């Protein structure tokens, strides 16, 4: 399994638009490209940072090569409109995973 780390600076006032588009986009990417989902964070410097889990680097690379396009142009447009800048920070192999998932409710 690998984890990809992404970051974005969002235009002021577009944070909720970004988060909604990120959530929907993540659902679509998971369904279309086989990721294991993602988690969005807010860094102290104001950037949004996401970690996404993938079964292997080949799966992630295949999706990255086509820019993870999905069949909802309005979601993509809302995401792009909200983002000032961003990119991939790291792609890392998971060596040990002690993250607790069972019994945990989603944070909104």
Image: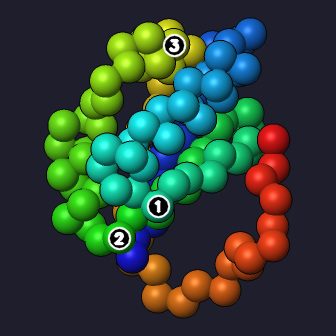
Q: What residue occupies the far bottom of the structure in this picture? A: 96
Residue carrying label 1: 36
Question: What residue is drawn where x is 35% and y is 70%?
Answer: 55
Residue 70 position, x and y percent, is 31, 29
1 or 3: mark nearer the eye: 1
Q: Are marks 2 and 1 in contact (CB under 8 Å)?
A: yes
Residue 87 position, x and y percent, is 42, 38
- Separation of residues labelled 1 and 3 (CA atoms): 23 Å
Q: Are marks 3 and 2 in contact (CB under 8 Å)?
A: no
Earlier residue among tags 1 and 3: 1
Label 3, secondary structure: give it. helix
Q: Is residue 1 above or below residue 86?
A: below
Label 2, secondary structure: give it. loop
User: Which of 46 and 73 lies nearest the eye of the viewer?
Assistant: 73
| Quarter holding residue 58 | bottom left
Residue carrying label 3: 78
Q: Is residue 67 left or right of residue 42?
A: left
Question: What residue is drawn where x is 26% and y is 67%?
Answer: 57
Q: Which mark is residue 55?
A: 2
Q: Which mark is residue 82?
A: none
| Quadrant occupied by the C terminus | top right
Q: Is residue 64 left or right of residue 37?
A: left
Q: Are marks 1 and 3 in contact (CB under 8 Å)?
A: no
Residue 22 position, x and y percent, is 56, 32
Note whether residue 13 is visible: yes
* Crowd band around label 2 with a 10 angstrom C-alpha radius: few (<14), some (14–19), many (20+): some
């Amino acid at each position: 399994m690998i984890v990809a780390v992404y970051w974005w600076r969002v235009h002021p006032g577009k944070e909720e638009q970004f988060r909604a588009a990120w959530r929907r986009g993540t659902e679509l990417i998971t369904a279309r490209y086989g990721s294991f989902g993602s988690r969005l964070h807010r860094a102290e410097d104001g950037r949004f940072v996401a970690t996404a889990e993938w079964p292997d680097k080949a799966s992630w690379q295949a999706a990255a090569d086509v820019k993870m396009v999905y069949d909802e142009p309005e979601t993509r447009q809302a995401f792009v409109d909200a983002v000032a800048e961003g990119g991939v920070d790291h792609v890392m192999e998971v060596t040990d995973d002690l993250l607790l998932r069972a019994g945990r409710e989603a944070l909104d």
